[in-house]
Image (cartoon, rainbow, N blue to C red):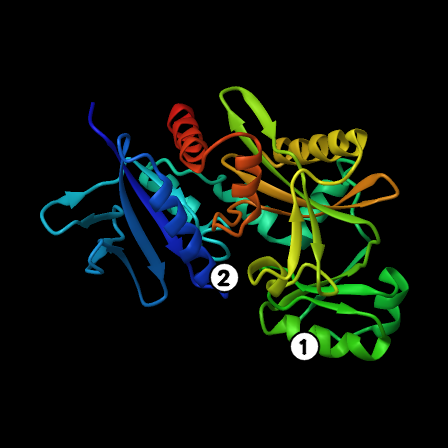
Amino acid sequence: MAKLLVAVAMGGYSSEKEISLQSGLVVSESLDPEKFEVYPIHILKEGWFYQDGHGKRFAVDKSNFSFSDGSQTIQPDVVFNTIHGTPGEDGYLAAYWELLEIPYTSTGFYPAALSFNKRDCLSVLKNFGIKCANSYYVNQGDKIATDSILKTVGLPCFVKPNRSGSSFGVSKVNTTEELHPAMEKAFLEDKEIIVETALKGIEVSVGVYRKGNELVAFSPTEIVPENDFFDYEAKYLGKSQEITPARISEEETLKVQNEAKKIYHLLNMKGITRSDFIIQDGIPYFIETNTTPGLSKESIVPKQAREAGMTLTQFFTILIEHTLIKK
């Protein structure tokens, strides 16, 4: 039986490029070599290319997403998308692969775009009864209505870029004087920002995926950052404890798993997603969902898969096979 040709898309155009390259490397190394022929595809501002094991680069033909391996032209059977941020997590590449009729492991272009925009995602989910923190939205150039913002969200609060990940540009604000500098920092990442009430509780993260007709939620991971919140250092430089399964009650576990699956279903997701919550007074409050969550060795989803008794090879095979079955 011929091996499936898998293009592992990695990189991207955002501040998360280096993290995505780590995720892509883990996926490329973990895919079953007996089932898949793996081609790491770097999608970067300076160009799209396949990079072979010797570091040699071959340009991708954007008209059909084909490329040379040095001896023949490769047309991938499926794309494993590991790009965090734009253009892999915000729907652009999903729409491109959709037009080319190439199956891909991540969610469709509209759910990707919607969930990447925190403001729009929260607005939709609140209408379906999903509990979220109070929030206030500001576009770059708007007059900063400090009193109105703080009346809505209170202190402490978080200031975040609306369309960004890995905690780039995020600040926790404890005093009125810290608000404007935090907003300026967030505007370096995005022209739209969101200011949210800082909830007090246990932060957890839940991976959700489909296996056949079943929607599966992993055991939640509890996040205990050394810093004031789960920032870049906590996520990627080891300055946090990530405890799987989370030290919460069975009832809270079921609540947050069901909420994560409900969000996956409501937003019509596919592939693996990871939703983040704060459990305050026993109630899960939704923070955000990630449609191409980190898959590096330090990332949460690989830890949850291992806790569930799967190797990454087994888990990634499930994601690819489900993508091809749905196609």
Looking at the image, residue 212 lies above or below residue 314: above
Q: Quadrant of residue 263?
A: top right
Q: Where does the image place residue 184, in percent across and percent down from the top left?
A: 67, 77
Q: Please tell me which residue is depicted at 55% across the width and 42% down the height of the picture.
A: 303
Q: Where does the image place residue 58, in percent across and percent down from the top left?
A: 19, 57
Residue 184, disc: 1
Quarter of the image where the N terminus is located: top left
Q: Please tell me which residue is depicted at 61% across the width and 69% down the height of the picture.
A: 191
Looking at the image, can residue 246 be seen? yes
Q: Quadrant of residue 199?
A: bottom right
Label count reads 2
Q: Where does the image place residue 17, in percent across and percent down from the top left?
A: 44, 62
Crowd tier of the residue under label 2, counting other residues whose Cα lies within 10 Å: few below 14, some 14–19, many 20 or above: many
The answer to whether residue 161 is left or right of residue 103 is right
Give the structural element (helix, strand or loop) at label 1.
helix
Give the structural element (helix, strand or loop) at label 2.
loop
**Residue type highlighted by circle 2:** Glu
Tag 2 residue = 16
The answer to whether residue 44 is left or right of residue 123 is left
